[in-house]
Image: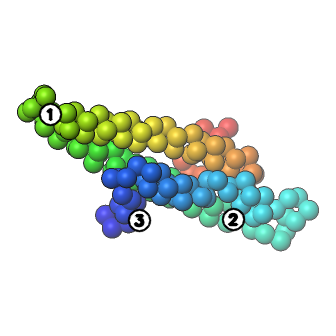
Amino acid sequence: MASNETNISCEDFLQFQDVLKTMRAIDDKIIYALNTTVPTKSFKGQVNATETCKGLYEELTESHRKRDSAIKKCISEVSSQVKICKAARDKDPDDLQAIKNLRNTQAKLRLMQSELNIEEVVKDRSLKVFHEKCRNHYVPPTHHDTVL
């Protein structure tokens, strides 16, 4: 897997959040992108709204997939670190540094897990806006049953 989502660093949570923020740019700009690319009735003949909506949908879903993969990769990595820290603490329950490392790593894991919830909210909002603007031009293949 040599794609971009594997380049995200899981060590520094703030850096992790910064990378996710950059990766969420398309979602943050979805309303603007739809307003400028999907034609109103008066400009209907000048733009191929079906192709525009399809392209934007593909871009959105690929971005969602990459972010989801990146978050889950980091959750997996940090979960492994938690196990290592627990083993170190269990080996010497009086080692204050081991206890501190475990707490810090558990906190980082909780923050990363909360990013999955944030991601779900961002994804839902973007797809709702997409549907509102593009429903008359393009119906994504996975939403045929749920759109109506």
Residue neighbourhood size for the residue with mark 2, other residues' Cα within 10 Å, grouped as few (<14), some (14–19), many (≥20): some
**Residue found farthest to the right:** 42
Counting residues from the start of the chain, the first of labels 2 and 1 encountered is 2
SS at badge 3: helix
Horizontal relation, residue 28 to residue 95: left or right: right
Front residue of this view, candidates 80 and 124: 80
Q: Which residue is under mark 2? A: 52
Horizontal relation, residue 129 to residue 71: left or right: right
Q: Nearer the viewer, mark 3 or mark 2?
A: 3
User: Callout 3, which amino acid?
Assistant: Asn
Q: Can residue 50 be seen in this view?
A: no
Q: Do the residues labelled 2 and 1 touch (CB within 8 Å)?
A: no
Q: Residue 124 carries which label?
A: none
Horizontal relation, residue 127 to residue 19: left or right: right
User: Callout 1, which amino acid?
Assistant: Asp
Q: In this view, does 99 lie above or below 7?
A: above
SS at badge 1: loop
Front residue of this view, candidates 121 and 22: 22
